[in-house]
Image (cartoon, rainbow, N blue to C red):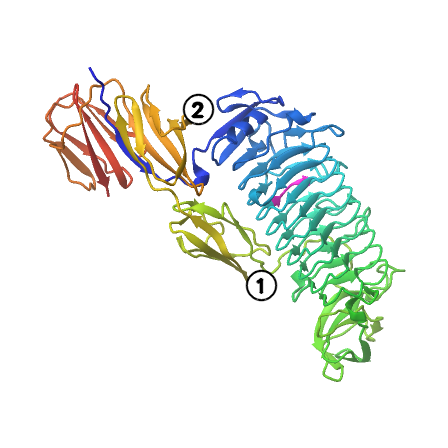
Amino acid sequence: MKKLYCLIVVFLVLSVNKSFSSVFIVNSLASTNTGAGTSGTLRYCIDQANQSLGPHTINFAVAGTIAISTYANLLPELLQPITIDGTTAPGFSGAPVVIIKGTIGTSGYYGIRIAAANCSLYGLEVSTFPYWGIWVEADTAKNFIIGAAGKGNVIRGNGYEGIVIDSADNGIIAYNKIGTDYNGSINAGNGYNGILLEYDADNNSITNNQISYNGKRGIDLNRGSHNQITNNFIGTNVTATINQGNTYDGIALENGSNDNYIGCNTSSCNHYNGIYLYGSNNNVIQGNVLGALSTTCAGNLYSGIQLFRGSSNNLVGGSSSTQFNKITGNHYWGIDLQDSTTLGNVLTGNSYCCNYRIGIINITKASNSITAPVFGLISGSVVFGTSLPNSVIEIFKSQKTNAALCPGNPADQGTDFIGTTTADASGNWSLNGSFNGWITATQRDPAGNTSAFTVPVYTGIAGTLVNNCTNAFTSVCGLNPVANFQSSNSHICTTDCINFTDMSSGVPTSWLWTFTGATPSSGTSQNPQGICYFNVGTFDVSLTVSNSGGSDTYTLPNFIHVIASPSAPGINHVNDTILNFTSDSSYVSYQWYRNNVLIAGATDTFLVITQSGNYNVEITNANGCKIAAGINIVLGLQNYMHDPVALLSPNPVKDKFTVYGLPFTVVQAEVYNVLGQVCRQSEITNRKSEIDFDVSSFVPGVYFVHVLGEKERWVGRFVKE
């Protein structure tokens, strides 16, 4: 007898980056591509995850070293949203127990290469590769995460950079040890920079890392904008007591690296400068410790900060003590400005002391060759002087106020900031207050050029210092907030939902989001989840962050790009065993799944059914957007779909409904959701021609009820309110 199938067709629009996600398990430390199903070597698991849309997660059932010594055994690059989580390995308690190890001098040249958006790496050691430890490649790799609190990575001993960010945006690099071991005390530096951001790598956050012993710079930012570098320890350990300096600068911004924020870092013991700017403008440097003093590390071997070759209009310091930088114990100058094209840099507040030469120097006509102001009358309650017309005068206590402090070092270093005044059109200025000890001053012209300090003068009253330059590594965090954020995706399809992550610095305490064109359209949580877009277009996103020090707003215009998803297909059955669906002209590819497992080779518009199960077809249109249609198939019954003579009432349903008027006696009853999953199944012992259902515990939505006789079946649809 011909078999007929009772088909319940349901449709579900699937988000592009949520379709058919999988969890893979690494159960072997071999470097070969071996495994079965969702388990195998790390190379196998990455290769399998790359074959379908994610997000995918790779966990570990083993701990130890994965040795990669040849180019042929390199790990596949990450081509889908993939999280590799070494913290899941047995024995993990903070220090990585999964080690991805290369061999210096071989042809295997990188450890992990990220080429897709929304990838994450946690709890791994990536070491001794000939070139790079981790390479994040191109804008397609945006929204990446490397490390998190309690889940940091160790990246050390690689021949070139520890981490390269090559044009990728909106990433987070946090809580890693780069160039040293997990304890942060062993020289295992990468041959070049700890972290290199290059070729317009924008809107990345580098925070809470220890970056030491590297052969060039701790962090090198080359042609990148709007990045945030905060709360890192560069060239020293977290207590700033051990010399772990990088061979060049701690932090470098080069070749048009503009509009970046460098806040609350400790950059000490490096062999050149704590922070170096070369041809980079409009950056903000606040709340950093540059040249921490200790028994083994007396600062950076050149200057605390060097601004060079056209590095202009940068802000160093700020309006509050939490924004001042501590610039201490460096072997040359506190701040060194060089070249006639280096102009308009505002140096305000800050604390300078014990630098081997003077606190601020302008070399080769930097800062328009502005000179220091001149003191006139000085008393305990007022200070007078002369300067350039309309310039801003900043008064400091000199380190000479403490005669025993750094003997032999120049005293024209402003250690305690006192206050600010502005000169009149003739250049005369005064400041009222309470003055004691030795004082010094700078002036800043209307174009923002800042002078060196004056030679200190004595007020005639003995005084003391707040900043004695001992324990100068004490944190000066507590900055005014600076807004920044990233999203889990920015190019999506209609009905997709995405998540947002706050990347702001300065310890904000409140958040106000605006999501133009989305549902919901606003939010106040720190990291909003499930923001959905239903209309085609480009949309702005804005974040305002606030704390007791102030607020800041960051807006990305036209940040979210929404393109059309395909229309839902119609499914039919042909003959006994073939499924076919009415296609849309925009469909370009198909993939069938059974029980959410990919059916290899099933990429046609039809599928031959040989076993029962929940079947889905994933359809892609020309825009790359996805939709899926699902169907539940039950084989082995001679089923007849009856005309709807029976009744299901009430419908919609609040708590209970009844199916009555059936032309057969009931043997079994089942309720399915729209995914074809059985929500309730009942065996009928007292056979009858009607049946009652209690669905009060069901979540609202659309459901299907199957009522079976011995050889017959009735199917109905109801809506749960």
Task: Return the residue nearer the eye: 429 or 313.
Answer: 313
Residue 319 position by quadrant = bottom right
Residue shown at the point (43%, 57%) measured from the top left: 516
Residue 411, percent from left and from top: 85, 65
Q: Is residue 376 left or right of residue 218?
A: right
What residue does disc 1 label? 549
- Mark 1 surroundings within 10 Å by alpha-carbon count, few (fewer than 14), some (14 through 19), many (20 or more): some
Residue shown at the point (55%, 35%) measured from the top left: 79
Q: In this view, does 566 lie to the left or right of 366?
A: left
Residue shown at the point (71%, 32%) measured from the top left: 129
Q: Is residue 545 above or below residue 632?
A: below
Q: What is the CA distance from the residue labelled 2 to the residue labelled 1?
A: 58 Å
Q: Is residue 12 left or right of residue 304?
A: left
Residue 250, percent from left and from top: 74, 49
Asked whether residue 54 is drawn in magenta, I would say no
Q: Residue furthest top?
A: 1
Residue 65 position by quadrant = top right
- Mark 2 surroundings within 10 Å by alpha-carbon count, few (fewer than 14), some (14 through 19), many (20 or more): few
Q: Which amino acid does label 1 sit on?
A: Gly
Secondary structure, mark 1, is loop
